[in-house]
Image: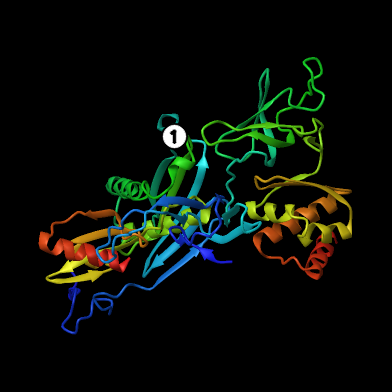
């Protein structure tokens, strides 16, 4: 394919975008980016950019999902057509996006104080503007900020980072080429208490390494 | 004045009784799961913030109860009892109306909840009318109820249908600030020309001035203050109003 294959970690200890193993990409956050949404935020980590808008608590659009004593959380994830490599078709992306949406929902269910808003719905809309690896951690960080912007009560805020393992060296905040090659773990944790609300991995990893990476992820958050 | 983030622990003040306002929660201490910290020995309840904002407190005296809350930014209204709100009628039933007050559930307004209303002389409001009302019942499990008279005196006191004018949607904290008498915005604007206004705690403001041009100038000035484009000093406001009236 291409003549020079990207080295994950070269001899000098640098990754393909000249970062050290534990170095995070340059990050920027902004709140209140969407004028009509109750809460909105845009997070950019390296070249990955995600914009989240939150509506709620509002009347539930689906009558079936109404719980009498809590708010229901609905998450929708959309990827812009110009994001990513451009070679993906929507049908293959749909299931992956639904998994991302379900992961975000599970992450925030214990954190949002849903018992304060019974029989209402909190609608979270995630739009990936440009994807360069790390969609899920950026979405979780952006969702936290959008919920804070909307004034929805949270027990603590959630931070998230992705970790990969290259031979024996864990790497933080993976970009797209690294994500494709390495086993990846996404950890979302609450900084105040150190509790973890999401640990997700789709590849295989040796169990000895797992604990080390999990603790590293909590600390990095 | 301290900025708090969700999850920040707040030190308990020394007063005997404490009322918690919005944005704060009391939790019994749970041992944290981090391996590095020691388990908490005291079992006293701790206060934690759940919203982003500035911590406000109202302490009346050493012995009396103190109340604390978090002053945060939001646009979505959560109904609370006895608050004054502006609502739009969206449906009409035999016994009353359904009103949209901007909360997650629609509110119900009884047809007899007006001053001097009897079964024979009910006011006849159309769908789409704007009303200024008071929340008589608001808890999170039931749909809110509003009434258009002051419960203490039984008189209208400015509640009821609002005719003419223009409705603006602003953030909740601007409405709270405008309701305090010391805020300079409304007084400065009144120095230019007379106008009538109703402020709802649900983020809606109704204004009505002598002419259409003045009303629109009011709307634009208030929206500019809401967006943060305009400060509230007298010179800035006067300059902005003149510019918009011209």
Say if residue B183 shows up in the picture.
yes
Question: Extreme front residue here?
Answer: B63
Depth order, front residue of B37/A34: B37
Residue sitting at 50 percent across and 46 percent down? A55
Q: Where does label 1 land, which residue?
A: A69
Q: Quadrant of the C terminus of chain B?
A: bottom right
Where residue B198 sits: x, y (%)?
A: 77, 45
| Whether residue B235 is situated above or below residue A157 in the rendered picture | below
Say if residue A83 shows up in the picture.
no
Task: Identify the image quadrant of residue B167.
Answer: top right
Task: Judge left or right: residue A73 versus residue A199.
Answer: right
Q: Residues within 10 Å of mark 1 (few under 14, many from 20)?
A: some
Residue sitting at 34 percent across and 48 percent down? A101
| Whether residue B136 is situated above or below residue B4 in the rendered picture | above
Q: Quadrant of the N terminus of chain B?
A: bottom right
Task: Please tell me whether mark 1 sits on a helix, a strand or a loop.
Answer: loop
Where residue B12 sits: x, y (%)?
A: 49, 59
| Parent chain of label 1 | A
Where residue B98 sits: x, y (%)?
A: 64, 28
Residue sitting at 53 percent across and 60 percent down? B13
């Amino acid at each position: 394919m291409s003549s020079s294959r990207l080295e994950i970690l070269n001899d000098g200890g640098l990754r393909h975008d000249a970062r050290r193993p534990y170095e995070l990409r340059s990050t920027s956050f902004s709140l209140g980016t969407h004028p009509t949404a109750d809460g909105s935020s845009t997070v950019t980590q390296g070249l990955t950019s995600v914009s989240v808008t939150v509506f709620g608590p509002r009347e539930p659009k689906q009558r079936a999902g109404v719980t009498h004593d809590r708010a229901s959380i609905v998450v929708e994830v959309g990827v812009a057509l110009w994001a990513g490599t451009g070679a993906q078709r929507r049908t293959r992306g749909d299931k992956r996006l639904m998994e991302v949406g379900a992961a975000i929902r599970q992450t925030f269910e214990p954190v949002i104080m849903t018992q304060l808003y019974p029989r209402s719905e909190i609608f979270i809309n995630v739009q990936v503007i440009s994807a360069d690896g790390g969609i899920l951690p950026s979405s979780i960080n952006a969702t936290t900020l959008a919920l804070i912007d909307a004034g929805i009560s949270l027990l603590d805020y959630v931070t998230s980072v992705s970790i990969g393992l290259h031979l024996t060296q864990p790497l933080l905040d993976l970009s797209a080429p690294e994500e494709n090659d390495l086993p990846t773990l996404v950890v979302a944790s609450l900084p105040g208490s150190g509790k973890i609300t999401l640990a997700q991995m789709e590849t295989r990893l040796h169990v000895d390494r797992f604990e080390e990476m999990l603790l590293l992820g909590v600390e990095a958050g | 004045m301290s900025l708090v983030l969700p999850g920040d622990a707040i030190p308990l003040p020394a007063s005997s009784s404490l009322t918690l306002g919005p944005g704060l929660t009391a939790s019994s201490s749970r041992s944290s799961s981090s391996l590095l910290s020691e388990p908490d020995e005291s079992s006293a309840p701790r206060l934690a913030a759940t919203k982003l904002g500035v911590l406000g407190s109202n302490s009346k005296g050493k012995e009396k109860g103190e109340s604390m809350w978090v002053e945060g930014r939001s646009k979505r209204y959560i109904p609370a009892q006895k608050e004054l709100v502006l609502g739009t009628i969206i449906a009409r039933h035999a016994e009353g109306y359904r009103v949209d007050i901007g909360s997650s559930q629609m509110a119900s307004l009884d047809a007899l909840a007006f001053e001097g209303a009897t079964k024979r002389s009910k006011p006849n409001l159309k769908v789409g009318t704007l009303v200024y009302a008071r929340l008589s019942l608001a808890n999170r499990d039931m749909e809110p109820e509003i009434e258009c008279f002051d419960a203490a005196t039984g008189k209208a006191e400015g509640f009821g249908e609002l005719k003419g004018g223009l409705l603006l949607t602003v953030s909740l904290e601007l409405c709270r600030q405008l309701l305090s008498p010391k805020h300079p915005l409304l007084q400065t604007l009144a120095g230019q020309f007379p106008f009538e206004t109703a402020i709802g705690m649900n983020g809606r403001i109704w204004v009505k001035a002598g002419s259409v041009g003045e009303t629109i100038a009011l709307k634009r000035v208030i929206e500019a203050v809401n967006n943060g484009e305009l400060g509230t000093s007298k010179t800035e406001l006067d300059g902005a109003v003149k510019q918009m009236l011209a």
